[in-house]
Amino acid sequence: MTNNKKLHGLQLSRRVALAAVAVSALFTFAAPAPSFAEDKSIKVGIMAGEEEDIWRVVTSEAAKKGLKIETVVFNDYTQPNEALERGEIDANAFQHQPYLDNQIKQHGYHITRVGYTGVWPIGLYSKKYKSVAEIPEGAVIGVPNDPSNEGRALRVLQNEGLIKLKDGTGILATVADVTDNPKKVEIKELDAGIVGRSIDDLDAGVVNTDWALKSGLSPAERIAQEPTADNPYRNFIAVKDDNKDADWVKTLVSSYQNDAVKAEFDKVYKGTGLSAY
């Protein structure tokens, strides 16, 4: 009898122990895992102006997923990649692939694209003429002077028949690649942020859309623009090469690529920019 009681007690103890293990496992596996980003804060470099409105929404969307974003605002294109390379920021969102390719070639940056944001078709603007056909012989036309945007601007002029570029010229075309200039226009190379602000002193200027908005230019003053189909100039979020597969990067991209951000994007850019994802 005593042995039976001992056996019964051992069986009971074993059942209690197994139940405890099961309960422990239940809590271990059923409890939600802490988000990778619960304590993750990042800095993202953006350009001053309309992008600040867009990124307020992105920041709000990221916060819902446990990722805290601090935006760092820049006023010219040369700074965000340098800051990213030095580790002063964790990501940036301001450039297209031709621009980054040229920056990598010049500076050896270890930066890569991780998610598209928007595209802003570059346009030819004029306050003096209503059409390209009206542009006179000897007109002065401003273009951005950074390699990627200059090539882009020159292609707009070529598409409109104002110039012809050397056959086989890539996206980094320069004025040295102009082989035909029937109206003998003077192409004036200026900083990308200056072209739009100098439009009163020019006959026309090829201006990036974001700078056109900052310069107070309206769509009515745009007399030509590049095509949007298969456009290689889509902007994107970029990070250091080592971070491209990080979980927080996936969360950052999804925090941009959603309906809430698209609605703000459309509101801010009024159709001058298009979502590119």
Image (cartoon, rainbow, N blue to C red):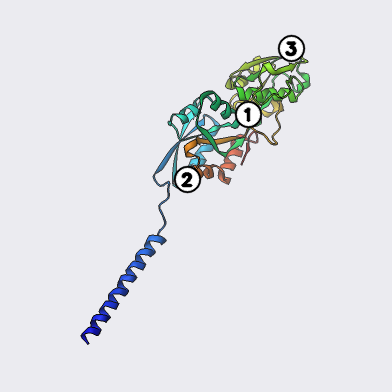
Contact? badges 1 and 3 (CB < 8 Å):
no
Residue 155 point in image, percent of width and height = 70, 25
Q: Quadrant of the N terminus?
A: bottom left
Relative to 158, 31 lies left or right:
left
Disc number for residue 209: 1
Mark 1 crowd level (few <14, some 14–19, many ≥20, 10 Å Cα): many
**Three-letter residue code for mark 2:** Asp
Q: Position of residue 39 (x, y in %)?
A: 39, 45
User: Between 143 and 221, which is closer to the camera in this rendering?
Assistant: 143
Query: Label 3, on which residue?
Result: 138
Residue at 50 percent of width and 38 percent of height: 56
> Measured along the vertical axis of the image, is residue 176 above or below residue 247?
above
Q: Report the front residue among 219 and 180.
A: 180
Q: Give the side of residue 34 with respect to residue 129, left or right.
A: left
Q: Residues within 10 Å of mark 2 (few under 14, many from 20)?
A: few
Q: Secondary structure at mark 2?
A: helix
Identified by mark 3, the residue type is Gly
Q: Is disc 3 placed on a helix, strand or loop?
A: loop
Whole-angstrom CA distance, mark 3 to mark 2, is 55 Å
| Amino acid found under the numbered disc labelled 1 | Thr
Image quadrant assignment for residue 260:
top right
User: Residue under circle 2?
Assistant: 247
Task: Between label 2 and label 1, give the one nearer the viewer.
Answer: 2
